[in-house]
Amino acid sequence: MLLGLTAESFGQNPIFANHFSDNGLCRLSYIKHGEGTWPKLATQSPTILVSFCSTILTLKSDPGVSPLQLDARNIHLLPAASSVTIEAISTVSEWLTLELSNDLFAAVEKEHGLDQSDLKTTLFNKGLTLHRSNWMNEVIHRYAYERIQMGKKSNVATQFLETELIKELLYAKEKPKAATEVRFDLDDHCLDNRDPLVRQATSFIENHLFQKFSLADICQHCGCSESSLQRQFQKAYRLSPFSYLKQRRLDESWHLLRSRRYNVSQVSDLLKYENVSAFSTAFRRRFGTSPSQVNQS
């Protein structure tokens, strides 16, 4: 059990996948689910909370404390004996928790010469949000792959990645500017050659994927004219902003149908189609199969 999570803790949240694993050094919990608010989760020891891909989580701790947003650009550290309420903003959310043992801090001290007491005080004395550098992001994803996909609890790779992650967290804490300059950012990556306006507008669409909004709303958010936005979207995607929106909604509909938590009619309503027939036609045109077939597979 991690962070007080059991099967009953999921409540009414639609769960698409979950994985729990304990190797003695680090207890891991991976969850992929639909939108919703989770019960308050209580930590037993220092804990790392990570979101994946386009997932956006809102973290609420004590009353009077402003909520925090967790996304692909940052990572949140929770001290032992603390609690947090997690609200999933994204339609489909993936996140990971890592509960760290005293033995892991001892391993970091042995491997890198970093005092374990200082590490705990510096990183886990209170709730802390840090930017994710490119290397930190690589470590997190590789560690998740080893533990979840490969089912490796304790091998050379996991042992290296565990101690490397703690070292990288300390670097991000002590040198926040350097970490910010090389942070991992799905919408503004240094290798992303899209126009900044396109990245900003795309981010707005992703964050409001199933909400009602107009082209004017996007333009107001980006501070641009409709003609400029249309022109840059055509250049980047060969699509209009709302053609892009329609395709993204269809992409998400695939995951929703595969989860079998929603029927075809419910997904059609969520995607704002006038009727199921129109949704089915658009879905088949994009994926070459009917939504009912995906929903039943």
Image: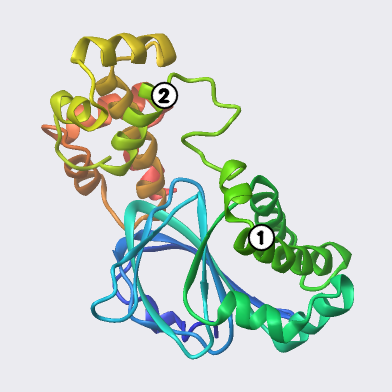
Relative horizontal placement of residue 256, taking residue 126 as reference (left or right): left
Q: Residue furthest left?
A: 274
Relative horizontal placement of residue 288, taking residue 137 as reference (left or right): left
Of mark 2 and mark 1, the one earlier in the sequence is 1
In the image, 132 versus 243, the foreground residue is: 132
- Residue labelled with disc 2: 196
Three-letter amino acid code of the residue under disc 1: Ala
Q: Position of residue 280 (x, y in %)?
A: 26, 31
Within 10 Å of disc 1 (Cα), the crowding (few <14, some 14-19, many 20+) is: many
The residue lying at 55 percent from left, 26 percent from top is 192
Number of marks in the rendered image: 2
SS at mark 1 in the image: helix
Quadrant in the picture for residue 143? bottom right
- Residue labelled with disc 1: 144
Q: Nearer the viewer, mark 2 or mark 1?
A: 2
The residue lying at 35 percent from left, 47 percent from top is 257
Within 10 Å of disc 2 (Cα), the crowding (few <14, some 14-19, many 20+) is: some
Three-letter amino acid code of the residue under disc 2: Pro
Quadrant in the picture for residue 241? top left
Relative horizontal placement of residue 130, taking residue 168 as reference (left or right): left
Separation (CA) of disc 2 from disc 1? 31 Å
